[in-house]
């Protein structure tokens, strides 16, 4: 378990710049029970001083949709997908035992009771902590989501190449 | 947490001490078809000599509930969740094609026929092999699970910080 | 974006053999919305020069079944599982909002419109790019799948040990 750092006599002479500690999360899911751990891990990583990047891709993009935006997309298929997937962090559902929202409501109630931050609060916190929140450009194109449909404070949309470049040497999780 | 490598005077002569090989699994799911690979990978990693840690979090905590414990939690919401999620490794369900248990039973039958260890056996094996089995404290609080509700032989409950500290330089999988 | 290490004049004096950049994906799912990102990430990684390996395991094995093969397995349980899981990349379903195939069809239509390669095309591309496509031997045994049931161009079936050996120092994703 120990990863002890050594004090070396010659450290100053031949500094070997170690790779920064990094955490890269592929936030693929839009389910409450996956968005939550993704954001808890991201903010925890940032608090530990790791350079943290979250790539929001596929269903994971919907939690980033602005709360007041209701229907997104340019054609009927994209609009229909957006209707079935109400965006924003306040409408997330559990992947199982959702019971038409009762399960999610119950889980959120338990979280409040235990002073666990909500996905919405965690997203704000992540931004403040300097976590890079990157929406996946390819998914945005596919779903017809524009930059103006998404919340403020995100990084430039990017794709798999950017995420994989960041991921080398990082802790990587696909959630 | 640091992964700094030491420069020593004899670094060129002596082989560079490799970082210990590590495997850190975030066992998020309580589904049979995810618990199984999580434990197969954990025991395989341990057999290969890797320092292996499994953090059981969210739904992944339920397989660790003692078999004789039926209802857990302190309030009705936690109790209801525990009723819907019968704990223990013997009551796991497939995430799809479960068919009210027929699918799971079939899969377990096939596994026995092919001499593949059950999740229960793999959990015992993991413990014997020295795999660190860590229940997530935050989830325990959220679900109202006490240490006495969980099986023996687990490590001290811990959280995201511990797991991420272990994860630096390790193979990391979110299952 | 590149993490390539430069060969410098003094590289020979202090040779620090960099580990090759590697990407190891555990393709566990047979759902369209997970097979897709798995193959996009695999081909992107290969294009970036990373040694890329995909271990197809559990439900993830079904997309590798030859299109003309309809029922696989040696006993009725395996045959039933194969009937419920039509193999091949052309019959993948979304994990949610599939609507008896309408959701998947819509998603594929959107993908074509945006010139996003299909899973079938991505699988061919991955092979051409030298991505190691490894079917999981244990799953093949469990499901009664023979090598002849699977598409051409795959690597030798292997298991968790092979994948974990590859995974050390690699970007690792369980999808």
Image (cartoon, coloured by chain):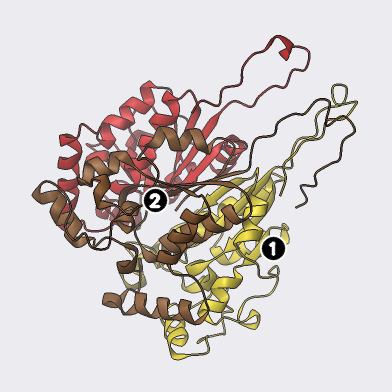
Chain colours: A brown, B yellow, C red
> Are marks 2 and 1 in one subunit?
no
User: What is the C-alpha distance between the residues marked 2 and 1?
Assistant: 45 Å
Residue displayed at 27% across by 33% down? C120
Residue displayed at 15% across by 41% down? C109
Q: Which of B3 and B139 lies nearest the eye of the viewer?
A: B3
Q: Which residue is mark 2?
A: A153
Q: Is residue C5 above or below residue A5?
A: above
Q: Which of B166 and C142 lies nearest the eye of the viewer?
A: B166
Q: Are marks 2 and 1 in contact (CB under 8 Å)?
A: no
Q: Is residue B175 above or below residue C123?
A: below
Depth check, mark 2 against mark 1: the one in front is: 2
Q: The residue tagged with tag 2: helix, strand or loop? A: loop
Q: Is residue C28 left or right of residue B158?
A: left
Q: Position of residue A6 (x, y in %)?
A: 84, 41
The chain carrying label 2 is A
Quick one: which residue is furthest to the top in this view?
C9
Q: Position of residue B74 (x, y in %)?
A: 53, 89
Q: Is residue A151 above or below residue B68?
A: above
Q: Residues within 10 Å of mark 1 (few under 14, many from 20)?
A: some
Q: Which residue is mark 1?
A: B127
């Amino acid at each position: 378990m120990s990863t002890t750092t050594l004090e070396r006599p010659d450290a100053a002479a031949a500094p070997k710049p170690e790779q920064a500690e990094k955490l890269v999360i592929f936030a693929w899911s839009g389910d409450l029970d996956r968005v939550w751990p993704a954001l808890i891990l991201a903010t925890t990583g940032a608090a530990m001083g790791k350079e943290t990047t979250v790539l929001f891709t596929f269903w994971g993009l919907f939690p980033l949709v602005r709360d007041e935006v209701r229907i997104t997309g340019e054609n009927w298929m994209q609009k229909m997908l957006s209707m079935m997937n109400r965006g924003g962090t306040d409408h997330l559902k559990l992947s199982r035992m959702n019971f038409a929202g009762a399960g999610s409501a119950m889980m959120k109630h338990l979280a409040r009771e235990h002073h666990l931050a909500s996905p919405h609060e965690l997203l704000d916190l992540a931004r403040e902590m300097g976590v890079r929140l990157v929406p996946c450009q390819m998914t945005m194109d596919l779903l017809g989501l524009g930059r103006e449909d998404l919340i403020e404070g995100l990084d430039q949309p990017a794709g798999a190449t950017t995420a994989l470049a960041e991921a080398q040497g990082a802790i990587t999780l696909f959630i």
